[in-house]
Every structure is written in C-alpha cells, then in structure tokens.
C-alpha cells in the first residue's frame, strides 16, 4: 500500500520519501530521522515512545531521534496527550473497551501516566463506563443463548473483565442479565 503523503506527491522535507536513512559513505543523514518520523506519522498517529522505538529499529542515533521528536513536538505534530485521547476514544467506540484495558494499551504504547489519566478522565465526560459496558454485554449476550445461566454469567463476566470494566459494573450487569443466578466469590 502506498503511503498517503507519497500518493499526494508529498515526499517529506527536502523532497525525499524518507526511505533512505543512510547518506554518502555510510554516514547517517541528519535529516533522515526527521524524514522517517514524518513518514511514520503520515501512516497513523503514534505516541512519542512508539515513534522513538520505530526510529531505533531503523538504527538512528539517540541524538537524531531526540532531535526529530523535539522538532515534531514543537511543530505540534507529536502530542502524547492528544494521541492518548484520540486512541482511547476510537478504541472505546469500535471495541467497547473499558478504562482498565484502555490504560493498559496506552501504557504499552509508552504514554505517560499523566496523559493516560487525563485521557480517561476526558472519556468519562464523553460516555459513561456503564453505558459502554451495557452495550458490550448486550452484544456478548447474543453468543450466550442456549447456555446454562451459570455458564453464561461466568462467560459474560470474563468477557467484560477482559475488556477492562470495573468489578462493580460487571457485577451490576451480571445481576441484571441473570437475576436468578446467585453471586459467587
């Protein structure tokens, strides 16, 4: 698949496609990390740490990587707080994920605790955790038809737990969908 920027005729700063990080005589091109970073961001939004990891894989020096990240941050192209919020909104909308799962995913992407907390707080203003969990439970209940109530309840609880919802929300939904099944520890 061709990169979006290259498809529109944009080839990054200096007219290069950003594909070649090596300059003449085997030396690293100082603008190569910048061009590679821009190309990676043209594909999809990334956290600073994700970008740092990808540039390390391409064997850029630590100084080049940090310079490129600083330049992208200063230009407003790289913002971990905005990335965290957009990632969490998209994952919650498409996958019906809860706050614990979203926090784990964002931390795995190298987003700091402060940015994760701010993104999750912003999500609470967008949609209530119980509403998202109820939608996920309703979807899961379709696949649990015909099972004994105890087994279906266990599977529903496990599914909601994997999606990152709180114990209180999971218990409330299990009680709502299976009122005849007693709670177990």
Image (spheres, rainbow, N blue to C red):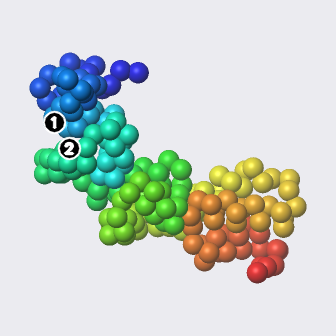
* Mark 1, secondary structure of its residue: loop
How many marks can you see?
Answer: 2
Q: Which residue is mark 1?
A: 30
Residue 28 visible to the viewer: yes
Q: Earlier in the sequence, mark 2 or mark 1?
A: 1
Determine whether, in the image, residue 2 is placed left or right of residue 26.
right
Q: Quadrant of residue 13?
A: top left
User: Is residue 128 placed above or below 77 in the rendered structure?
Assistant: below
On the rendered image, what quadrant is the N terminus found in?
A: top left
Q: Residue furthest front?
A: 25
Q: Position of residue 179 (x, y in %)?
A: 77, 74
User: Is residue 175 placed above or below 79 in the rendered structure?
Assistant: below
Rate crowding at label 1 as few (under 14), some (14 to 19) or many (20 or more) other CA atoms within 10 Å: some
Residue at x-position 45% and y-position 57%: 108
**Residue 64 bears which disc, if any?**
2
User: Is residue 117 placed above or below 78 in the rendered structure?
Assistant: below
């Amino acid at each position: 698949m061709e990169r979006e920027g290259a498809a529109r005729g944009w080839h990054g700063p200096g007219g290069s496609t950003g594909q070649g990080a090596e300059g003449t005589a085997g030396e690293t091109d100082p603008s190569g990390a910048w061009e590679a970073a821009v190309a990676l961001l043209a594909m999809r939004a990334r956290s600073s740490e994700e970008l740092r990891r990808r540039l390390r894989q391409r064997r850029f020096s630590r100084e080049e990587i940090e310079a490129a990240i600083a330049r992208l941050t200063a230009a407003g192209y790289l913002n971990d707080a905005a990335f965290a919020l957009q990632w969490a909104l998209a994952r919650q909308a498409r996958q019906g994920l809860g706050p614990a799962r979203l926090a784990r995913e964002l931390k795995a992407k190298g987003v700091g605790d402060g940015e994760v907390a701010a993104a999750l707080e912003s999500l609470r203003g967008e949609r209530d955790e119980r509403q998202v969990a109820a939608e996920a439970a309703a979807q899961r209940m379709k696949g649990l038809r015909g099972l004994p109530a105890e087994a279906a309840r266990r599977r529903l609880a496990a599914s909601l737990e994997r999606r990152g919802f709180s114990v209180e929300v999971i218990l409330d939904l299990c009680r709502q969908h299976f009122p005849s099944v007693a709670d177990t520890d």
